[in-house]
Image (cartoon, coloured by chain):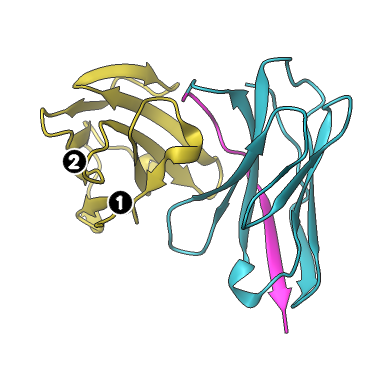
Chain colours: A cyan, B yellow
Amino acid sequence: DAKTTQPTSMDCAEGRAANLPCNHSTISGNEYVYWYRQIHSQGPQYIIHGLKNNETNEMASLIITEDRKSSTLILPHATLRDTAVYYCIVRVEGYSTLTFGKGTMLLVSP
Amino acid sequence: KAGVTQTPRYLIKTRGQQVTLSCSPISGHRSVSWYQQTPGQGLQFLFEYFSETQRNKGNFPGRFSGRQFSNSRSEMNVSTLELGDSALYLCASSRTPGGLETQYFGPGTRLLVL
């Protein structure tokens, strides 16, 4: 799987949009970008994934650049409960072998 | 419906011992994956089982093994424990293998090796 690079930590004010970047410059054509998050003491939770088109669901939006070398996860209205470590992963869909990086610690403050 | 359950939640062992961790997937889920999480290495894939067969394996030594039963419950075993095996061991289940977005994680078993 391609390696990803994320900032170690980010801050966001409650109610504002949180934009979490991820670089994956060595991504292959058949690799998807996945985002997961892990709230303290819980197992990781799936957020969203995409190949090359922007994606949106009830939790977040995923913006992938045209060259697919980077992406941004957008939480449109961050709440305190969104405080978590966010992981960006690239992998071939249907292939489960994967390695999470250290992710981005997002702290949402009142 | 009930989520993924893992037992025990906490465990303390000493070097050289072995340990067995258990995971019960969500009802109807036939795929179970195991991960190790440490502060230094992050979350790393151990192996995946589907229909009692190991489908994929991560880069871990042979001391780490697992199995899956006909009811989809899974166990992982670590023999000859080392201090570095102290970690949070997470289990995730899904209906089909390899479907990352459909994986549901359990709360984990925190293992401390002294």
Q: Residue at x 74, y 69 (%)?
A: A77
Q: Residue furthest left?
A: B70
**What is the magenta range?**
A96-110
Q: Secondary structure at mark 1?
A: strand
Q: Quadrant of the N terminus of chain B?
A: bottom left
Q: Residue at x 39, y 46 (%)?
A: B104
Q: Amino acid at mark 2?
A: Val
Q: Which residue is mark 1?
A: B111
Quick one: label 2 or label 1, which is nearer the N terminus? 2
Q: Are marks 2 and 1 in contact (CB under 8 Å)?
A: yes
Q: Is residue B17 visible?
A: no
In depth, the one of A79 and A103 nearer the eye is A79
Q: Could you tell me what secondary structure mostly forms the magenta stretch?
A: loop
- Real-space CA distance between mark 2 and mark 1, rounded to the nearest whole angstrom: 9 Å
Q: Secondary structure at mark 2?
A: strand
Q: Is residue A104 above or below residue A83?
A: above
Q: Which residue is mark 2?
A: B19
Q: Residue at x 52, y 28 (%)?
A: A98
Q: Amino acid at mark 1?
A: Leu
The x and y percentages for residue A34 are 63, 37
The x and y percentages for residue A68 are 82, 27
- Whether residue B7 appears in magenta in the rendering, the answer is no
- The chain letter under disc 1 is B
- Whether residue A107 appears in magenta in the rendering, the answer is yes
- The chain letter under disc 2 is B
Q: Is residue B103 above or below residue A79?
A: above
Q: Which image quadrant for residue B69?
A: top left
Q: Is residue A69 above or below residue A58?
A: above
Q: Is circle 2 on the same chain as circle 1?
A: yes
**Which class describes the residues within 10 Å of circle 2: few (<14), some (14-19), or many (20+)?**
some
